[in-house]
Amino acid sequence: MANDNFVQPSIPRFDGHYDHWSMLMENFLRSKEYWTVVESGVLMLPEGATDAQKAEHDCLRLKDLKAKNYLFQAIDRAVLETILCTDTSKQIWDSLKKKYQGNARARRQQLQSLRAEFETLQMKLEESVSEYFSRTMVIANKLRIHGEKMKNVTIIEKVLRSMTTRYNYIVTAIEESHDLDEMTLDELQNSLQIHEQKVKKQEKEEQLLQA
């Protein structure tokens, strides 16, 4: 019996943001078991190939055609017309990578810029925990997309040392009572948000007393 809860994943549409799209598209093709032909291509059959080799080659060619079909559906006509060779899924993928990913020097410069942005990141005075976490994760995810092997503990340590002074107490408590290597980002955000609510409540009560 078919699973009524199964949802067919949609094909990621190329929107010009290559790094993000390529990550989504690679994952999509892996889920379909077509990534091997996209990554490695389909080799020519050797002379005197056996029936088993021919059957395997035909299977790979069929996978390549299906992978091409998905790539064609993901790419707009205007982009497709700029690709010189579309005989195989590997050629399409490699052409897009060469055209949109940029050269190695440009990628290194972008990575250095993102590292600097991450290092200088600080929570703003009127910024909420949720807003600061969102801003931090945007930069952290960009770093990961560009090849930076960033662990969660690095993000946790960065957040803790860049909070405003109103969070000094909870930051100290977290550092003393938790193993940061084992802590999750969700746990950290939840702890900080609970403290944030307490601080806001206390500030509101003080304002009422002053009034």
Image (cartoon, rainbow, N blue to C red):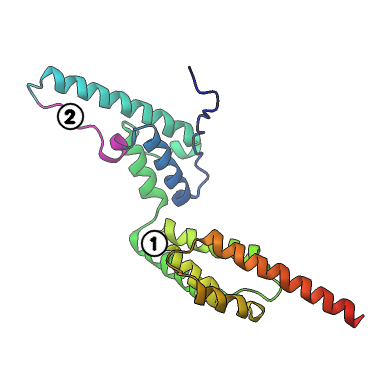
Amino acid type at mark 2: Met
**Image position of 153 with respect to 25: above or below:** below
Using the image, tell me which numbered label, if any, was put on residue 107.
1
Residue bearing the label numbered 2: 44
Q: Give the mark, 1 or 2, whose residue is nearer the N terminus.
A: 2
Q: Secondary structure at mark 2?
A: loop
**Image position of 112 with respect to 2: above or below:** below
Residue 64 placement: quadrant: top left
**Image position of 120 with respect to 61: above or below:** below
- On the rendered structure, is 146 left or right of 209? left
- On the rendered structure, is 150 left or right of 173? left
Residue 179 placement: quadrant: bottom left
Query: Distance from label 1 to label 2 (Cα)?
Result: 34 Å
Q: Residue furthest front?
A: 177
**Image position of 65 with respect to 164: above or below:** above
Residue 129 pos. (x, y %): 64, 66
Quadrant that contains the C terminus: bottom right
Badge count: 2
Was residue 5 drawn as part of the magenta stretch in this picture? no
The structure residue drawn at horizontal position 26% and vertical position 27%, both measured from the top left corner, is 60
- On the rendered structure, is 23 left or right of 46? right
Considering depth in this image, is 45 or 24 the residue closer to the camera? 24
Considering depth in this image, is 150 or 92 the residue closer to the camera? 150
The structure residue drawn at horizontal position 13% and vertical position 17%, both measured from the top left corner, is 51
Residue 41 pos. (x, y %): 26, 36
The structure residue drawn at horizontal position 40% and vertical position 53%, both measured from the top left corner, is 101
Q: Alpha-carbon neighbours of circle 2 within 10 Å: few (<14), some, or many (≥20)?
A: few
Q: Residue furthest right?
A: 211
Q: Alpha-carbon neighbours of circle 1 within 10 Å: few (<14), some, or many (≥20)?
A: some
Amino acid type at mark 1: Arg
Was residue 37 drawn as part of the magenta stretch in this picture? yes
